[in-house]
Amino acid sequence: MPDLTRTLEANGHLIDSGLMAAIMDTVILGGGDFEIVEFDIGRTNEDPSRLVINVSAPQQDRLDRLVGELHRLGCFAAQPPDATLKPAERDGSVKAGELVVCGYDGMRVVPEFKARDRHEFSFMSAEISSERKVELAVRDLARMMRQIVERKGKIVVVAGPVVVHTGGSDDLAVLIRTGYVHALLGGNAIAVHDIEHALYRTSLGVDLTTGRPVDAGHRNHMMAINAVRTAGGIRPAVESGLITSGVMYECVVNNVPFVLAGSLRDDGPLPETIMDLYAAQAAYTKAIEGADLVLMLASMLHAIATGNMLPASVITVCVDINPAVVTKLNDRGSGQALGIVTDVGLFLNLLAQELE
């Protein structure tokens, strides 16, 4: 008869994060039984706890299903077997014949843990902060960003064109200039609108000072694209003195790398925009490597794409006026995402003031 018991182990702040209860609930609701073999509780705020548990079920398929569900909660085999490697049957994101990992064996998931020092990052105690808590959220986020910069960590910003529309590009430029942004990700639009604003003080032909369309302003968007293409790209446009302010300007003069991922709907696009999907994905992956914090600013599609590439240990903060955007990011499996529902221009202005 098959062995219908598996010994699993879990480590971390199991009680604070609610994982201990979640593990036991999963076993019971899944029709199994558990026996706690060992449970060492951390003695200080910094010490992790350790759980060793026997999980059993009446049928093998039910046990396998339970083990899979517990795996997502951070449980792993106490004596883990080697990973199961099988050759890919046909070309895809890997080449045919290349070995890929299959199943749960040899794999380990590190789940998200809530911060024990809750008074320090209190806005993170809820998945989505309401607008009336923006000042508190900004203050706590600024404190976190200072700590990351002080220890020479890495902050990545994912930004959409709404940053420019709402008047937040000048404040984002300040964050880049003062060393709080170490990589910028986005699409063709964030760069185009930022450069249009730098050249003509408009965004899609609207004067951001008055909020009114300017005469023949509809041309400014394409004129900005053509000016950069004539110069040979964003960096040459900055170096020649054509662009003297804005987000892209600060990235160039402060040597902050940026990646612009293209799409079918892009007009232009700018020379630096990567129109090859796989090349853009690879560039994003390289840019977020080693990130401690990813700040996602009003860019649902690029935020979701970036979130799908991040390990659970990376803190992500999504800022959008639409609560459905941050909810959608969580629903896509980016459980490490924390949301702030507010106008992104207001948010960036408050954040820049706090960090200055």
Image (cartoon, rainbow, N blue to C red):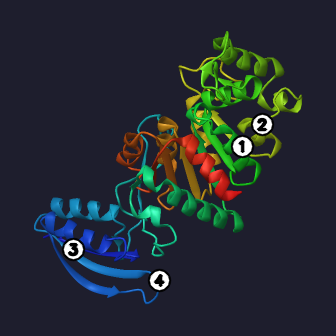
The N terminus: image quadrant: bottom left
Looking at the image, the residue that sits furthest to the right is 240
Q: Nearer the viewer, residue 41 or 102?
A: 41
Q: Amino acid at mark 4?
A: Asn
Q: Which residue is mark 4?
A: 45
Q: Secondary structure at mark 4?
A: loop
Q: Residue at x 12, y 64 (%)?
A: 59
Amino acid tagged 3: Val
The CA distance from mark 3 to mark 4 is: 29 Å
Instruction: Give 183 or 247, whichever is nearer the viewer.
Output: 247
Q: Position of residue 40 (x, y in %)?
A: 36, 87
Question: Dot 3: within a 10 Å radius of its alpha carbon, few (fewer than 14), some, or many (20 or more) residues?
Answer: many
Helix or strand or loop: what does disc 2 sit on? helix
Residue on which disc 2 sits: 249
Q: Nearer the viewer, mark 2 or mark 1?
A: 1
**Residue hosting label 1:** 173
Can residue 7 be seen in this snapshot? yes
Q: Residue furthest front?
A: 210
Q: Are discs 2 and 4 less than 8 Å apart at CB?
A: no
Q: Earlier in the sequence, mark 3 or mark 1?
A: 3
> Reading the chain from its start, which is encountered first: label 3 or label 4?
4
Separation of marks 1 and 4 at Cα, in angstroms: 38 Å
Residue 272: x %, y % from top left:
71, 29
Instruction: Indicate which disc, 2 or 4, sits on the residue closer to the N terminus.
Output: 4
Amino acid type assigned to the residue bearing label 1 in the image: Ala
Q: Which residue is mark 3?
A: 55
